[in-house]
Image: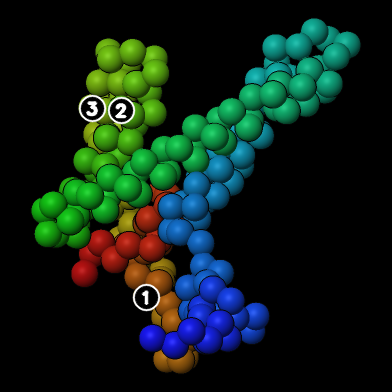
Amino acid sequence: MESSSSSSPLTTTARKDGPYMHRQPKYLYKANEGFLMGMLCGIPLHLIKGISNSPNGQRLSGGFQAMRTNAPRLACTFAAWSVLQNISICVISNYRQKNDMKNVYVSAGVASGLVNFRKGVVSASKWAILTPFTLISFVTVAEIMLPSIKTKIGNEKSRLSSDTPTKSWYEILLALLFPCQLLDYKLFV
């Protein structure tokens, strides 16, 4: 073993950055996406609620006050839900050895149940049961409405050159339902 301190990885001054040196974990990105989605939903929601619940002379300031206090709280809940859903999708898909929509439905129920567990067992179980059914209903309605959208997309694909990448109708459906959440997954392969 060499005793030279210049070859030791702890004492070198000029080190090479590896490919994963500045890379952040995937769950951190999901938390960022969930926080952004929560803020985008919470700002108009709490602004409108604040305007409608404020007295006549102070509607705008009451709306902004409600938005400042409540929108970040909703965004943190969205971020927690997003991270929990991503973790549970990974766990369920590794357990089942399949990557399909059942994983998404079950993981959404698990994430909703865990986020709402602070409100009690009854509330957590309600949300854990209702969230997958809500997702299934959204997907079913979108599948009923998508044939007309699919033909429009088909017409657009024929006009575009073959070099331009296009999205399938499943990816468009996922983008409409979950803007930041599910685009990373290849669920319909």
The residue lying at 42 percent from left, 91 percent from top is 162
Q: Residue 106 — which label?
A: none
Q: Amino acid at mark 3?
A: Ile
Where is residue 56? Give x, y as percent: 83, 10
Q: Amino acid at mark 1?
A: Gly
- CA–CA distance in space, label 2 to label 3: 8 Å
- Secondary structure at numbered mark 1: helix
Residue topped by disc 1: 154
The residue lying at 56 percent from left, 82 percent from top is 5
81 and 145: which one is in front? 81
Residue topped by disc 3: 129
Where is residue 118? Give x, y as percent: 39, 18
- CA–CA distance in space, label 1 to label 3: 37 Å
Q: Which residue, as the protein is rendered here, is positioned at the far top? A: 55
Work out which quarter of the rendered image holds the N terminus and state it.
bottom left
Residue 40 figure quarter = top right
